[in-house]
Image (cartoon, rainbow, N blue to C red):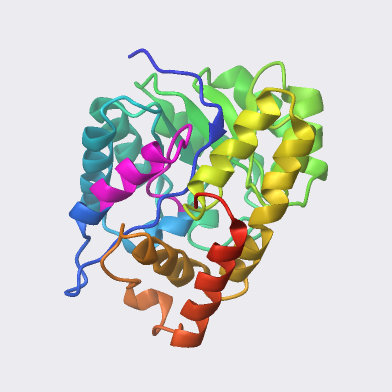
Amino acid sequence: MATRPLRGYFPIMATAYCDDGGVDLASMRRLTAFLITHGAQGMSPNGGDSEARHLSSDERMRVLDVVLETNAGRTPVLVGASAPTTEESAALVRYAERAGADGVFVMPPANWTQTLLEPRVPDEEMLRHYAAICEGVDIPLMIHATAAMDVPFLQDLIDRIPNVRYIKEETTYGPKLRRYVRELGDRVTVFGPGLHYPAELEWGAMGVMPSCCAPASHARVFDLWQRGEHDAARTTWNRMLPLVFWRWRTTPQEAGKLYLREMGVFETTLTRPEMGAPKLEDADRQELLRVMAAMGEPV
């Protein structure tokens, strides 16, 4: 299967729900079209910020189907395939390849059920996991880096598994990302979380994977940076910062869905019950509207 290089703004796609708690596939179609219209260079369903931990494998497959169908090849689709077991992750990887995704991003099962920082999974266990999920497939793999991963481990992984072509680093504010670029950048492409967006590009990252909020501005930062207009890219980023801060310091998943509802993309701001009771109040919505108005450009 021919796949395209992954570069640019690849937002982690929020997952929409109907009032009955089921996945709202119509809203997922609208979100896919919304991201394309606003210039996203790619998109990433079924990540951590998508609440994929609380979706069944079947729900994740249906979401991917809808995203790929609506996208219709207009941008690359990089899909999350992390899961509580190697077997489930391998099944998601195989499905992604058959469906036509451009890549998968995966962390070890123990980190999927806990955090990127803990537990610190032994190298051999991680190697076995990645070797198993890549057996019999050619789809490019992005390693969703954890705190336990270091350069020697990743060098060994790249040597053993030719599918490994990307790394997403978000376990430090920058030192590990910079080291990965310096020492592995001729073998893999490094992505960052987009929390220090222009800085991550300055350090050598070729893509970021933040939220779906302000996709036009996120995409513009990357385009400006690639054209060498670094000051303009930083100005665009600085204009976005109140929205980025508002989302992270409110309730990230619910807040991102409120933004998408205000933009006419989602019908509800519902999250899965495992995420807890709704927390946003009208005062939070009013602050969001003020922040959006102050940005002064398409959001």
Up-down: is 255 above or below 209?
below
The x, y position of residue 99, in whole percent, is: 24, 30
- Viewer-proximal residue among 192 and 94: 192
Indicate left or right for 82 with 144 as reference.
left
In this view of the protein, can residue 148 be seen by the observer? no
> What residue is at 52 percent from the left and 47 percent from the top?
108
Up-down: is 1 above or below 140?
above
In this view of the protein, can residue 19 be seen by the observer? yes
Residue range (magenta): 28-47
Indicate left or right for 147 with 142 as reference.
right
> What residue is at 38 percent from the left and 57 percent from the top?
52
The x, y position of residue 82, in whole percent, is: 43, 47
Quadrant in the picture for the N terminus = top left
- Viewer-proximal residue among 40 and 160: 40
In the displayed orientation, state which residue is furthest to the top: 2
> What residue is at 41 percent from the left and 56 percent from the top?
50
> What residue is at 56 percent from the left and 34 percent from the top?
127
* Residue 131 is covered by the magenta coloring: no
The x, y position of residue 138, in whole percent, is: 39, 19
Indicate left or right for 238 with 113 as reference.
right
The x, y position of residue 49, in whole percent, is: 47, 58
Give the tally of numbered discs: 0
Up-down: is 291 above or below 135?
below
* Residue 33 is covered by the magenta coloring: yes
Up-down: is 80 above or below 136?
below
